[in-house]
Amino acid sequence: MSDWPDGYGRDDRYGQGSGRMQPEGARVMPHVQRGQTARPIPQQGGYDDRGYDDRGYDSGYSDGQVYGNGSGGRGGDDGYYDDGRGGRPAPNWRRRIKIGALTLVVVFLAVTIGTYFWADSKLKREVDLSKVIERPGGGDGTNYLIVGSDSREGMSKEDQKRLHTGKVEGKRTDSMMILHVGDNGNTMVSLPRDSDVEIPSFKGSDSGKLYPNQGRRTKLNAAYAEDGPELLVRTVEHNTGLKIDHYAEIGFGGFANIVDALGGVEMDIPRDIKDRDSGSDFKKGKQTLDGEQALAFVRNRKEAGSDLERTKNQQKFLATLANQAATPGTILNPFRLYPTMGAGLDTLVVDKDMGLLDVAEMFWAMKGITGGDGKSMNIPISGSNGGNLVWDKAKVKQLVEQLKNDEKVTVSEN
C-alpha cells in the first residue's frame, strides 16, 4: 500500500511522481517523420497516454524563431533591437539631434531674456523730461543728449586721488554732445561747455516753480549746475530749436570702470601730452589706455589749448570706446560682457522713457560713426565773448534743419 495521497504514486502519468524508490527515467519524445502530419494539440488540459502535457503549451522554437520576437534577432518595426536578452531602444539620432537643438535654443533664449531684464533693471531712470516746458516740435530720427558729468558719486578718496578728480561737492557737466540717429547717417555734435547761451524760462525740477526768462546769458554748463538735467535739456532745446528725445549721463567713476572692464581701449595719441591737472602723460602713437589714463585723456583741457580741441578728443575716444565694446569678442564673451555692462549701467543715468534698446541704439550709432557711417563735429562757432564761445547762428540753424529732416549733414563746423 502506497503512502502517497490519492491521485499520486501512480506510475502511468509523467510528471506526477510515483511510489517507487528509484527515480523515473527519461521518456522518449515522439518523432514525427517528414511528410507525416503532426499530432494536433488537444484543446483541453491534461496529459496524453504517453505522459505529455496536452494543455496547449508552445515552446516558441517550432518555427525557428526567437521567443518573443519574430524577426530572428534583428531590429523590428517598432524601433527596438533584440539581442536575445530582451528588447532595448535603438539609437534614434535624428530625435536626439532635434532634442539637443531645442535645448540649446531654450537655454539661449532664457539667458538672453534674463540678461535683458537684469540690464534693464540696472538703468537709473532719474530724469523726467515731462518737466521740460515749451518744447520745440519733433522731427525725423532720434536725438540723444549725452552728458559726461564730473560726479564723484561712489568714488573713494583713493579713487579721487588716483583719477585726479579732486573732491568737489555736487556735480557739473564735463562734456555734452547731441547724437542724432537717422536713416541718412548718424551725426555727433559736441557742445562746448563754455558755449554762450541764454537761460530760458523753466520750471524747477524739484520745486515745480516757474522761473521766467530774464535774458540772462551764461556758459552752457551753468544750466546743469543750476537745476540739473531738466534745465540743461530745456536750455539746449531753447538755443538750438532741436527737440531732445532722450538723455544719458555717465560720471567719472563709471567711465573709468567701463574702460577697465574692456581691458583697456587702444588710442592713437596725436602728439606728446602732459597735463598735471588731468593727470595726462602720454607719448605720441598707438597705445592701450586703462581707465585712469582714458579719463585723463578726455579731461585734458589746459594742454589742449581750447575747449574745442578737448571736445574733439572726447568724441574720438567715446566713438572708439563704443566701437571696441560692440565687438564679438566682448558681446559673445560673458566674462567681458557682464562686467562691461555692469560697470556702465551702474552709473548710467537716463530719462524715464529710455529703455535698454534705446541705450543699445545709442552706443551702436557711436560705433557706426567710428566706422565712417556718419559724421562727428563741433557745433559751428563764430567767435567768443568774454571767454564764452559764441555759436554761428546761421550755420546752427542750417544744421538743425538738416537734423530735423534727417538729411545728410553738409554743414561744416568752421
Image (cartoon, helix red, strand yellow):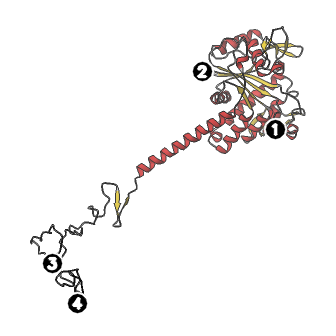
Residue occupied by mark 1: 292
Tell me where residue 67 appears, x and y as whole percent: 28, 66
Q: Where residue 120 sits in the image (x, y, percent)? A: 65, 33
Q: CA distance from mark 3 to mark 1?
A: 102 Å
Q: Report whether residue 162 is seen.
A: yes
Residue highlighted by disc 3: 30
Q: How many residues crowd mark 2 within 10 Å: few (<14), some (14–19), many (20+)?
A: few
Q: Amino acid at mark 4?
A: Arg
The amino acid on which the numbered mark 3 sits, given as a three-letter code, is: Pro
Q: Are marks 1 and 4 in contact (CB under 8 Å)?
A: no
Q: Relative to residue 214, is residue 116 drawn left or right?
A: left
Q: Position of residue 332 (x, y in %)?
A: 62, 41
Give SS at disc 4.
Answer: loop
Marks 1 and 4, Cα distance to the nearest angstrom?
Answer: 108 Å
Disc on the earlier residue, 1 or 4? 4
Tag in front: 1 or 4: 4
Query: Which label's residue is closer to the chain start, 1 or 2?
Result: 2
Which corner quadrant holds the N terminus? bottom left
Give the number of the disc on residue 194. none
- In this view of the protein, which residue sits in the foreground, 301 or 31? 31
> Does residue 238 lie above or below 109 as drawn?
above
User: Which element type, helix, strand or loop, lies under badge 2?
Assistant: loop
Circle 4 residues within 10 Å: few <14, some 14–19, many ≥20: few
Kind of residue indicated by mark 2: Asp
Location of residue 112 by image quarter: top right
Distance between mark 2 and mark 4 Cα atoms: 109 Å
Q: Which residue is mark 4?
A: 20
Residue occupied by mark 2: 183
Helix, strand or loop for disc 3: loop
Report how far apart the C-alphas of labels 2 and 3 lie in the structure: 97 Å
Give the mark nearest the N terminus, 4 or 3: 4
**Closer to the N terminus: mark 2 or mark 4?**
4
